[in-house]
Amino acid sequence: MADTPAAGTPGALDALRWTITLDLASLAAIEDDVRRFLVDAGVDGRAAFTAQLVVEEIVRNLVEHTPPYAAHETAEVRIAVGPATVTVVIEDARPPFSPFDGPALDVTAPLEDRRAGGMGLHLVRELTDELTYERAGERNRLVAVIGRAS
Amino acid sequence: MQMDVAERGDGITQVALVGRLDISGLHEIDLKFHAQTAARKQPAIIDLTRLEYIASLGMGMLISCAQSLQRKGYPMILMGAHGDVDMALRRAGLDQAMPMAGDLGEAERLIAQA
């Protein structure tokens, strides 16, 4: 659920925050909001595409690694739009998980050897201009910076 | 998310994916897409001309169906991807795993050569 006003409306901000429970339905429910916010904030092209992809891939990965007994827990998604960049910040209180963990995706593998696993984090690493992860106290904090001119 | 199936009558499946292949979009078409591609015994052309967004979940659907067809001996061609969709598919290496064609004529030629 969004808890700050959308850009393009009276009192609009160039940043928006959503707090969502860790299930796919909650993620699916904010995808249109994220897209509309970016459109209203004047973000288009690759920056808009990548910002949406980062939210989908990171939160979905988080959901998939969350056991049912913890599905009531939440993640916070924030997007801030600046003149030259879009910044996506995703925080959660699940166990430590870095987007830099795991084997690199073999993008040259033949079709029969392809698996969907690992492709999302690969795309996040590939398409963002800056990607940082830190464990701050009991929380994971991922920050993705996407250039608007790229 | 919309899925348009062209009735060609020549033994080739042609399916257009229209809109956003995000989580909601995938849930809307996943079963229908598998039924029209992986479940059939013929080559398939997937028209991505009007696809606006795709992430790894959607790419996984394409890979899964292409693998099913490959096991039966039939190719699946991705056709008409452009802009950010084309960029994302290539960054994920899908162009290394399955044929990508710029237009319908090229897709049909790739099937004829397969």
Image (spheres, coloured by chain):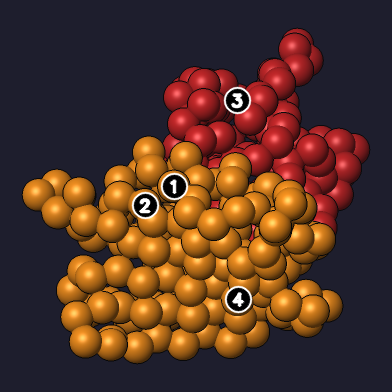
Chain colours: A orange, B red
Residue identifier under label 4 = A87
- Do the dots labelled 4 and 1 sit on one chain? yes
Image-based side of B78 in relation to A120, left or right: right
Instruction: Residue under label 2, please give it.
Output: A20
Q: Amino acid at mark 1?
A: Met
The one nearer the camera, A27 or B83, is A27
Position above or below: B53 against B72: below
Where does the image place residue A76, in percent across and percent down from the top left?
39, 63
Whole-percent x, y for residue B74 in the image: 58, 35
Residue A75 lies, in percent from the top left, at: 33, 61
**CB atoms of marks 4 and 2 within 8 Å:** no
Q: Are marks 4 and 3 on the same chain?
A: no
Query: Which type of secondary structure does the marked residue at label 2 adopt?
Result: strand
Q: Chain of mark 3?
A: B
**What crowding class fits label 1: few (fewer than 14 Cα within 10 Å), some (14-19), or many (20 or more)?**
some
Tell me the residue that label 3 is attached to: B42
Rounded to the nearest angstrom, the CA distance separating label 2 from label 3 is: 42 Å
> Residue at the spot x=53%, y=27% of the render?
B29
Mark whose residue sits in front, 1 or 3: 1
Discs 2, 3 touching: Cβ within 8 Å: no
Q: Secondary structure at mark 1?
A: loop
Cα distance, mark 1 to mark 3?
44 Å
- Of mark 2 and mark 1, the one earlier in the sequence is 1
The amino acid at mark 3 is: Gln
